[in-house]
Image (cartoon, rainbow, N blue to C red):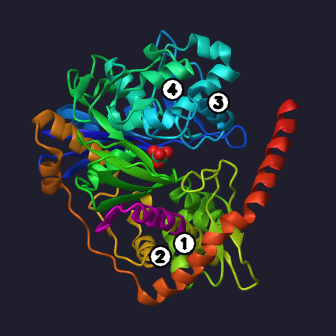
Amino acid sequence: LLTLGLDVGTSGLKALVVGAEGEVVAEATAPYAPRSPRPGWSEQNPEDWWRAVGSVCAMLGPVVGDVGAIGLSGQMHGSVFLDGAGTHVGPAILWNDQRTAAECDEIERRTDRRIRDWTLNPPRTAFTASKILWLRNHEPDAFARTRSVLLPKDFVRFRLSGDEATEVTDASGTNLLDVRNRIWSTETLAALEIDPSLLPRVVESVEVTGCVSAGAGAGLLRPGTPIVGGGADQASAAIGNGICEPGVLSITIGTSGVVYAQIDQIVVDPTEAFHTFCHAIPGTWMMMASVLSAAGSFQWYRDTAGAADADAAEAAGRSGFDVLMEGVSATPAGSAGLIFLPYLTGERSPHNDPDARGAWIGLNRRHDRRHLARAVIEGVCFALRDLVDGLAGLGAPVREIRVAGGGAKSALWLQIFASVLGRPVRATTTADASAYGAAMLAAAGASGEPIDALARHWVRAGPLVEPIARDAAIYEDVHAVYRTLYGANRDAMHRLSNLDRATADEGHGR
Ligand code: XUL
């Protein structure tokens, strides 16, 4: 049986065709980008995703016609608002959009803070519920035309099969799911006055939701091919990393960075840094915390300060990323006294602050672009370390750390990460763990084989990357400084982001 995993990411759509032994038979990626029309906003046109599905199917070629089951994975929390004809009424508001702080307050008020009892999670600007309220508050006409609200991967499902469905892992990130019982929370919907008919039905990740309809799938996917629920990209990445038991952590370094642990009994983080969501294995849950700009920070660096170097490398036929990483490798651990704060799109965990802002701190005349680049990578690793420490502080066992995402494709990044954590890490065989996990969920759904058995069969962990003792000692000290910088600069960050908004508002009025 060949299975197809499709991951509707933030920077592109990734497709993997996987064979019965877990081998990747074909892969394709179609890039696209989020738009930020105003400070703190992040949007995408759902048609970009659908066009990308057509592109990857075409790139994969005839093998797509042999696919026997499809699994979907995607960026979490984003809201696709559809009218009665299935057309979106405006752009999708994405997970890293920060416009909904007032709606989060509204949710606290309307639920009298009991949303924590009902959904196990507090409101967050990321989560879908605040986005629904934002549309109702700010674009009442568009809201009045809205007949369904779908998550990004479920919009692709809708286009492929005509079914309006989601599954428990992605539904957890809406802030509307009763995570304990794995059904929509009637209390929450009532308190927020959200009509339950706006929401799709919810299944488990391995359940089949429907089949490819005739005419969908760019004429390449076979009509009638079953589509399983799949999972949120983080849940799918955890499956792709073989996370089927507590104690083995999955960390993704994608646009965002996520620390993810399976739990067999519900735990709620009193500090609210970790979310408690359903895991893709029925009867299990997960704790997850997210930094908003991980590889996204390095992508920003590549496109701005590093653009001249990267563009020159690419013009000469080399990878811009590789050339930037060569500069990183030529600079010392600790970036000669330079620290980067990766709060380019505000921060979720642990600060939960939409108005947090990034910085390089410690600049001196000896620094050049290579130090700037290294500090970016180290800053992202420090942010992730705060989350790993937080999880350990909740008493969660941490026996092994598996890393996926763009950052895991770089041996140097993995090495720096191991040294920052002061413990070994390993990548799994596919860095595209979300698409791979989605293919695994499809295989499990189609064959009935339990996920953990499939994971033992399919998932191959790469070699252990050990910390370098000398670097780890330096990072201990630098991280101690890093930890003080958010609090010390919070006020300045807020004033600057207010100024930025005010200036942008003026520009908007002109
Ligand atoms: C998780 C989150 C992000 C997106 C990125 O809560 O917001 O990791 O899933 O794709």
Q: Is residue 363 left or right of residue 74?
A: right
Amino acid type, callout 2: Val
Between 179 and 127, the one nearer to me in the picture:
179
Q: Indicate the secondary structure of the residue bearing disc 2.
A: helix
CB-based contact (under 8 Å), mark 4 and mark 2:
no
CB-based contact (under 8 Å), mark 2 and mark 1:
yes
Q: Is residue 307 left or right of residue 275?
A: right
Spatial separation of the CA atoms under disc 3 and disc 1? 37 Å
Residue that label 3 marks: 106
Neighbourhood count class around disc 2 (C-alpha, 10 Å): few under 14, some 14–19, many 20 upward: many
Is residue 317 on the magenta stretch? no
Between 489 and 89, the one nearer to me in the picture:
489
Q: How many marks?
A: 4
Seen in the picture, residue 356 relative to 469 is either above or below; the reply is above
Residue that label 4 marks: 80
CB-based contact (under 8 Å), mark 4 and mark 1:
no
Identity of the residue furthest to the bottom in this view: 470
Seen in the picture, residue 439 relative to 373 is either above or below; the reply is above
- Give the numbered dot on residue 420: 2
Query: In the image, which residues are magenta?
Result: 382-404
- Give the numbered dot on residue 378: 1
